[in-house]
Image: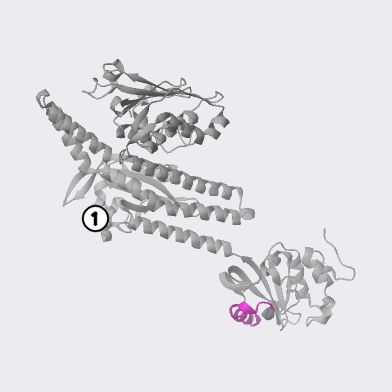
Amino acid sequence: MNTLTHGAPPFLNGGGEMGALIRSKDWSSTPIGSPDAWPQSLRTAVSILLNSQFPMFVWWGPELITIYNDAYIPIAGEKHPQLLGRPGSDAWEEIWTDLGPLVESVFAGISTWSEDQLLVMNRRGYFEETYFTFSYSPVLNDEGAVCGLFCACIETTEKVLAARRIAESEQNLRNTILQAPVAMCILRGDRFVVEIANDRMFELWGRGRSELLGQPIFEGLPEVRHQGLEEILLGVITTGEAFIASERPVQLPRNGTVQTVYINFVYEPFYDGDSNITGLIAVAVDVTDQVLARQQIEDIVVQRTRELAATNDALSKSNQELKRSNTNLEEFAYAASHDMKEPIRKIHFFADRLRGELREQLSENQRLLFERLEGASRRMGALIDDLLTYSQATRGAAEQEPIDLGRRLEQVLHDLELEIEQKGAQVEVGSLPVLQGNGRQFQQLFQNLLSNALKYSRSGVAPCVRVSARMLPAGDPLLQQHVPDGQEGRSFHLIEVSDNGIGFDQSDAERIFNMFTRLHGNAEYRGTGVGLSIVRKVVDNHGGVIWASSEPGAGATFHLLFPEEAHA
């Protein structure tokens, strides 16, 4: 509520804390004298600032006596309230070399405007880097002479520092791209201009840096047109959804001709500081040699006769090993997970810090944009972690020791204890064997299978998960149906993990083990599509077989076979 001190002029009415301080101050002892004698222009300026919610101040007279409003108090810091009535050059001595020339211009009748001006201020007992946008306007006395200046200002320190941090994060990302062990680039805009690319990407494109850098990719590399890539790129920047391809054939220039190259690649949308999609990041690995080698081996296997069974078996194992290793993809997953995680962590850290510092100034839409930015960085971090785990699993089960599967499962249940309790789940565990293998990988296997069983539960139905094991003797019908040719005469341990969840169509039972395959969107069930690929990789590492059986709404069962020779 506005108050008027008895005897104070009406133009000093209101103004909150500063209004009260101005009314109570003995101005007659200052160079500008009593408010009753102030010129009309000074009265008007003071009335304006007292009734404004915007930071403002007036410097009056040759001494530049300071008068300011409540909104200016945070800028003044510990100089408040002693700043009121002090000469500006004394109060702001540490920055007067910056402000003095501007003041001289104003007293010469020239208004000034400064945007994001750096001022090294001492307002809290220490010097700090600050930035302000402000204007100085001359205030005339009743005779028309300049007798003071009026300033409206806003502190932009957080904005400037945030922009600097974002620029540093972008530079870190650029450095990561240039140093990455796989082909990477950034394409900008809906014309997909090549903004930055590393040497491996130019090698993949079959063009020199000078031919493509700064050019729209489909103009600088017309050979890739009409292969469906334009539509894929437009889909990524339009929907914001990443696109992942494995062993996709692409026609690219090679040695003066156009050849088919097989590529594993990922297209991810690229966001600016305002969470607008401005382009995309591409990561690619040339797997032509692996694909052609595999195709050649497959052709040889088809052509071999029964008399060459031994040779055919060796070739088949070699082919399976080639599929399992997929060297370039492993190098991408392992190296990129390390090289890319730091920029992602910084983006998440600075976005969270910026949101906290600007919390009171953010609109609802801006808060939603921050949540989208942080959500995207968390999903990317989770994907990188899963890729690293998959990369580690691809190296096989090098550490072989007796593994008590029951104890490993107990550890997983302990780790999932909170989620089990929250969902009201029941987990029934039968007697499990002791197998020779890698304990950490078996724990990853159970972790992924049980996490999926809890995640994909039906709404309103408490999850029920059963884990059981039994021995299948040689010749069992299940072995004849599922184990590779020539192994039906061996005994196998059958381990089954079943649940009462949402299930899936049996036609998807093989596809769910493929890398990045998800049957549901992130809005329904969060995940990266890597977990079951890790499970299959662990089973492969231990000479086993895995398959799934399910139907929608009736739960799912994962069947795992391990040879009896693995028994410890």
In the rendered structure, the answer to whether residue 468 lies left or right of residue 481 reads right
Q: How is the image coloured?
A: one colour
Q: Is residue 95 above or below residue 550?
A: below
Residue 357: x %, y % from top left: 60, 57
Q: Nearer the viewer, residue 67 or 496?
A: 496
Q: Nearer the viewer, residue 214 or 99?
A: 99
Q: Quadrant of residue 520?
A: top left
Q: Nearer the viewer, residue 231 or 70?
A: 70
Q: Which residue is mark 1?
A: 207
Tell me which segment is drawn in magenta.
91-107
> Does 468 appear in magenta?
no
Q: Secondary structure at mark 1?
A: loop
Work out which quarter of the rendered image holds the C terminus and state it.
Answer: top left
Q: Nearer the viewer, residue 104 or 180?
A: 180
> Does 93 appear in magenta?
yes
Residue 286: x %, y % from top left: 25, 46
Q: Is residue 107 above or below residue 304?
A: below
In the rendered structure, the answer to whether residue 410 lies left or right of residue 548 reads right
Q: How many marks?
A: 1
Residue 22: x %, y % from top left: 80, 71
Which residue is at the far left?
307
Residue 439: x %, y % from top left: 38, 36
- Dot 1 amino acid type: Arg
Residue 15 visible somewhere in the drawing: no
Question: Residue placed at 22% from the left, 47% from the top?
Answer: 252
Q: Is residue 188 above or below residue 532?
A: below
Which residue is at the far right?
6
Residue 327 visible somewhere in the drawing: yes
